Image (cartoon, rainbow, N blue to C red):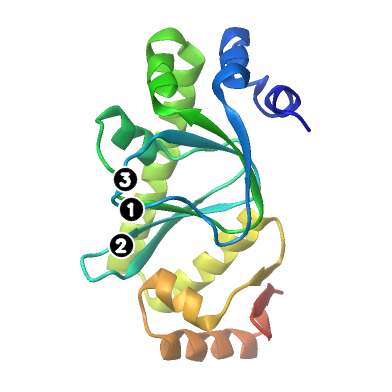
Amino acid sequence: MKIHEIVATNFSNIFETKLLKELCDYGLLKHAEEDQIILEIRREIHFIPLVTSGVVKVMRRDGKGKGLFLYYLSENQTSAIAISYALENKKSEIRLKAESNITYISVPVKVVNSWFQKYDSWRAFYLKMNHKQTSLLLEDINDIAFENLEFRLVKYIEYTSLVHNSTTIHRKHFDIARDLRVSREAISRLLKKLEKEEIITLGRNKITLN
C-alpha cells in the first residue's frame, strides 16, 4: 500500500482532512524488521514514528547499561515521551525497538511541532497517547512497589499476548528476566510453577496462555 492509502485507512477517523494531507506530504513510509532500533537513547530526535502495523517495544536504560521495559506501541500509536523530548529539543532517553516486523510513518519533528498550533485533532491524539502511556508507567511503578513477581510475570505475559493479538508469545526466559529486571532463574522457576498450575504451556522459546 502507498502512504496515502495507509493514512486514509488508519487515520481518517482520527485526524482532520488538512492534517491527513500534511501527513502524506511530509511523512515517509518506512519498514523495520524485528529487533531493529527505531529511536536510540542519547540520540537527537529528528523524526516521530507513527506505527501503522506491528509492535514496537519502548525501553530505557539505567546508568549501568541495563534495559528496562516500559510499554508497547501498536497500530495507530506513537510515543508521547519521544514527542515531549522533541518539543524541548532534548536527546532521547528512551529506545524504540521493533518487536516484530513493523511499518511506520516517519514525520520530521519540526512538522510535528507545528501541528500542535494548527490542529485540534493532533493535540487530542497526543493527550490521549500521553494519558495512556503515563497510566501504564504508573501501573508499572505500583506493581514493582506492591505486587509480587508472579503477579508481574502473569501481567507481562497477558499484556504481551494482548498487544500481539495471540495467545502464544515468543520469548526466551532471559528476555523476560531482562524486561522485568530480575534473574533468569527466578523467571524460569515461576514459569514452571505457572505451567504446573495449567495457566500457561511452555515451548521452545515460546509461552502459550491456556
Q: Horizontal and vertical percent for residue 93?
A: 29, 49
Q: Quadrant of the C terminus?
A: bottom right
Residue drawn at x 50%, y 28% as measured from the top left: 107
**Three-letter amino acid code at the position of disc 1:** Ile
**Three-letter amino acid code at the position of disc 2:** Arg
Q: Which of disc 3 and disc 2 is earlier in sequence?
A: 2
- Write down the residue under mark 2: 61
Whether tag 1 and tag 3 are in contact, CB under 8 A, the answer is yes
Query: Is disc 1 placed on a helix, strand or loop?
Result: loop
* Mark linked to residue 156: none
Q: Which of disc 3 and disc 1 is earlier in sequence?
A: 1
Q: In the displayed orientation, state which residue is furthest to the right.
A: 1
95 in relation to 133, above or below = below
What's the distance in space between the residues labelled 2 and 3, CA to CA?
A: 11 Å
Mark 1 neighbour density, 10 Å: few (under 14) some (14–19) many (20 or more)? some
Please name whichever residue, 174 or 109, is drawn nearer the observer in this view of the structure: 109
- Write down the residue under mark 1: 41
Tell whether 79 sits left or right of 92.
right
Find residue 67 and report its image quarter.
Answer: bottom left
Tell whether 33 sits left or right of 118.
right
Residue drawn at x 68%, y 85% as measured from the top left: 204
Whether tag 1 and tag 2 are in contact, CB under 8 A, the answer is yes
Find residue 170 and report its image quarter.
Answer: bottom right
- Write down the residue under mark 3: 92
Mark 3 neighbour density, 10 Å: few (under 14) some (14–19) many (20 or more)? many
34 in relation to 50, above or below = below
Residue drawn at x 37%, y 75% as measured from the top left: 148
